[in-house]
Image (cartoon, rainbow, N blue to C red):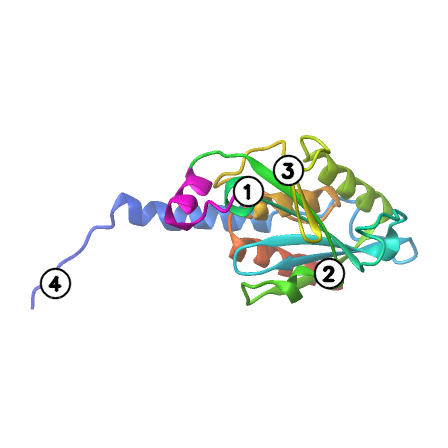
Amino acid sequence: MIVTLVQPTSHGIAVPIAFSTIVLLTACASPVEGLWPPAPDSPARDVIVSLDTWHAMIAFPREYETEDSALSSHHLYEEWGYAERAWYVEGKTGLSGGVRAFFWPTEGVVEIGYYDRVWKERTPQPPAELFMFRVSEEGYRRLRLHLYSTMLMEEPVVVFGQSTFYPAKRFYHLFHTCHQYTARALLEAGLPISVFGAFNRTSLAWQLQRATKFAAK
């Protein structure tokens, strides 16, 4: 019997090394002391993250808000998201749209919507997961300030139903999608999240599950 030894290619070695590096960096993410988790006897707020097959959204229960506009006053949640403008607003989808969105920096949009149900319950692309976190008052304030800072201007690009889309400061590309956008926002609230490690849905979900277990300790 002749045994042929196959030498691993550089690509075959690089992939597991890159994956292991990302896992290691993600596992090293730690909560920000004094921000998260909030002390048991201190005021805290709920932050909800919905994660479906492709998209991530951050929601805030409306009882925490005082705004009284015609769009928001009768809905239970305020939701924030991030997407590529051409795909979600202009309808330039398909294979060419996917290649463009991931491999070429293009304009992004920030979505703010007001709904009776969170994205996990409305998504047309299941399966979806929901993660709820209690954050400190200061963490909540920093989180919301960060989200507003991602908008290039307050003049909307378009309004679709109960969602308004605003131009984003940063371009959309492979290393800045809705997953990294969500991770960066949660990091502002003090959660143990790695932005670099949130490169897709699976890696972000793993981090959110880890944070949930950390909060339960």
Circle on res. 3: 4
3 or 4: mark nearer the eye: 3
Residue that carries the numbered disc 1 in the rendered image: 196
Q: Which numbered disc, 2 or 4, marks the residue that appears first in the sequence?
A: 4
Q: How far apart are marks 2 and 4 (CA)?
A: 54 Å
Amino acid type, callout 4 = Val
Tell whether label 3 touches label 1 (CB within 8 Å). Answer: no
1 or 2: mark nearer the eye: 2
54 horizontally vs 215: left or right: left
Tell whether label 2 touches label 1 (CB within 8 Å). Answer: no
Q: Position of residue 119 (x, y in %)?
A: 66, 60
Q: Magenta stretch?
A: 90-103
Residue that carries the numbered disc 3 in the rendered image: 157
Residue in front for this viewpoint, 114 or 18:
114
Residue at left 78%, top 45%?
33
Residue at left 54%, top 63%?
125
- Residue 172 visible in rendering: yes
Q: How far apart are marks 1 and 3 (CA)?
A: 29 Å
Q: Which numbered disc, 1 or 2, marks the residue that appears first in the sequence?
A: 2
Q: Distance between the residues labelled 1 and 4?
A: 41 Å
Tell whether label 4 touches label 3 (CB within 8 Å). Answer: no
Residue that carries the numbered disc 2 in the rendered image: 132
- The quadrant the C terminus occupies is bottom right
Q: Distance between the residues labelled 1 and 2?
A: 22 Å
Q: Where is residue 158 in the image (x, y as percent from the top left)?
A: 64, 42
